[in-house]
């Protein structure tokens, strides 16, 4: 890990020279995007986990879908991605189609 002084934010020392990687706004925007993508990936994993439990009879579909919708709303996924995208993720997880979850949509 490289420590970067506050006056050099956006630059990083690499073997004898400074290389610009981005400005402050770009770095913050990239951090924002990374967190949003992590949220989306985890949301999708949880949708598939609950869908599996539903298929095993451990949870009712309506309870799982309602809970996942509440989670998406609380974590601003509905606002950020739109209702259609969240509904598509839920439909994909809770359908009986035989394809792997992570290959059917690119986050």
Image (cartoon, helix red, strand yellow):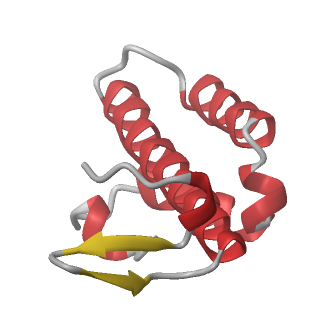
Identify which residue, 97 or 13, lies in the foreground: 13
Rendering quarter of residue 85: bottom right
Question: Percent x, y for residue 64?
Answer: 57, 28
Asked if 92 appears above or below 61 in the picture, the reply is below
Question: Percent x, y for residue 34?
Answer: 50, 59
Looking at this view, name the residue that lies furthest to the front. 16
Rendering quarter of residue 55: top left
Question: Percent x, y for residue 9?
Answer: 57, 64
Identify which residue, 12 or 41, lies in the foreground: 12
Determine the residue positioned at 70% across, 42% down. 72
Q: Is residue 51 left or right of residue 17?
A: right
Whether residue 34 is visible to the viewer of this picture, yes or no, is yes
Identify which residue, 30 or 56, lies in the foreground: 30
Whether residue 33 is visible to the viewer of this picture, yes or no, is no
Q: Is residue 28 left or right of residue 57?
A: right
Determine the residue positioned at 31% across, 71% down. 13
Looking at this view, name the residue that lies furthest to the right. 79
Asked if 29 appears above or below 60 in the picture, the reply is below
Q: Is residue 41 left or right of residue 91?
A: left
């Amino acid at each position: 890990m490289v420590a970067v002084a506050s006056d050099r934010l956006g630059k990083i020392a690499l073997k004898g020279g400074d290389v610009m990687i981005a400005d402050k706004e770009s770095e913050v925007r990239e951090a924002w995007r990374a967190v949003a993508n992590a949220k989306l990936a985890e949301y999708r994993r949880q949708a598939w986990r609950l869908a599996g439990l539903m298929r095993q009879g451990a949870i009712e579909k309506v309870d799982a879908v309602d809970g996942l919708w509440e989670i998406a709303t609380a974590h601003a996924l509905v606002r950020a991605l739109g209702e259609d995208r969240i509904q598509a993720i839920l439909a994909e997880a809770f359908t009986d189609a035989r394809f792997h979850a992570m290959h059917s949509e690119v986050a």
